[in-house]
């Protein structure tokens, strides 16, 4: 990326230890910003209610995550990191992504089902019907959506990263 060439130390002698420590600091800063944004969203929802806009925090969370995914895939390190993870972990990264997408979809569907039954139903049988109906429809929508987001993005990024690595080797 040639946008920040003036920040580059190309042609200069650099101490690898210092660069690695700086990278660790940048990683810690990234994690801190993500935690602050997430805490802000949770804090706003608990203290101020769900009517409070949190678009800035959500934009920070999504944009930085998407940037990291795109950048690591374009540099070819995503597939390497996934391979290292698969060798050292009990479950493959693709399996974890499938489980994560499914759990998020089921969790959101159950939340919408309970919320619909509690807010809009008048009696016990109607509550059960609203819960089943809303939860089932939400399952049909959100499980495939979250599976496509988690597993699909992982698969696409892994293939793109492997393609970059293959081109680098040639």
Image (cartoon, grey):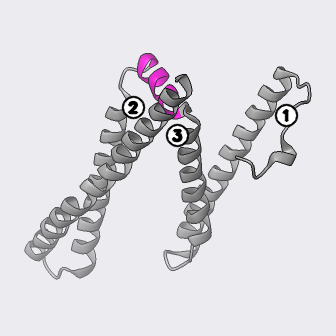
> Which label sits on residue 73?
3
Indicate the position of residue 152 as horizontal and vertical percent values: 34, 46
> Which label sits on residue 10?
1
Q: Residue furthest right?
A: 12
Q: Earlier in the sequence, mark 3 or mark 2?
A: 3
Q: Is residue 81 something one can see in this rendering?
A: no
Indicate the position of residue 154 as horizontal and vertical percent values: 40, 41
Query: In this rendering, would 130 be left or right of 79?
Result: left
Identity of the residue drawn at 59% across and 51% down? 67
Category of crowding for the residue at label 3, using alpha-carbon neighbours closer than 10 angstroms: few (below 14), some (14–19), many (at least 20): many
What secondary structure is marked by label 3?
A: helix
Q: Residue furthest top?
A: 87
Point out the frontmost of discs 3 and 2. Answer: 3
Q: Earlier in the sequence, mark 2 or mark 1?
A: 1
Point out the frontmost of discs 2 and 1. Answer: 1
What secondary structure is marked by label 1?
A: loop
Q: Residue 14 magenta-drawn?
A: no
Query: In the depicted view, which residue is nearer to us: 82 or 121?
Result: 82
Q: Residue 80 magenta-drawn?
A: yes
Identity of the residue drawn at 91% across and 25% down? 13
- Where is 68 relative to 80, above or below? below
- Where is 32 relative to 80, above or below? below
> Which label sits on residue 60?
none
- State if disc 1 and disc 3 touch (CB < 8 Å): no
Q: Which residue is mark 2?
A: 93
Identity of the residue drawn at 46% across and 17% down? 88
Query: In the depicted view, which residue is nearer to us: 84 or 90?
Result: 84
Category of crowding for the residue at label 1, using alpha-carbon neighbours closer than 10 angstroms: few (below 14), some (14–19), many (at least 20): few
Point out the frontmost of discs 3 and 1. Answer: 1
Q: CA distance from mark 3 to mark 1?
A: 23 Å
Indicate the position of residue 4 as horizontal and vertical percent values: 79, 49
């Amino acid at each position: 990326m040639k946008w920040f060439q003036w920040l580059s130390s190309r042609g200069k002698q650099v101490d690898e230890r210092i660069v690695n420590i700086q990278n660790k600091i940048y990683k810690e800063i990234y994690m801190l910003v993500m935690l602050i944004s997430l805490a802000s969203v949770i804090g706003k929802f608990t203290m101020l209610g769900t009517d409070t806009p949190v678009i800035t925090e959500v934009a920070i969370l999504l944009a930085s995550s998407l940037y990291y995914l795109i950048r690591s895939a374009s540099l070819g390190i995503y597939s390497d990191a996934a391979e290292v993870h698969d060798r050292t972990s009990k479950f493959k990264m693709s399996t974890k992504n499938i489980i994560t997408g499914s759990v998020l979809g089921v969790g959101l569907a159950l939340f919408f089902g309970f919320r619909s039954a509690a807010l809009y139903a008048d009696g016990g049988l109607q509550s059960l019907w609203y819960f089943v109906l809303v939860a089932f429809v939400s399952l049909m929508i959100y499980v495939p959506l979250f599976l496509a987001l988690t597993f699909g993005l992982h698969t696409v990024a892994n293939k793109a990263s492997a393609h970059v690595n293959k081109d680098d080797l040639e």
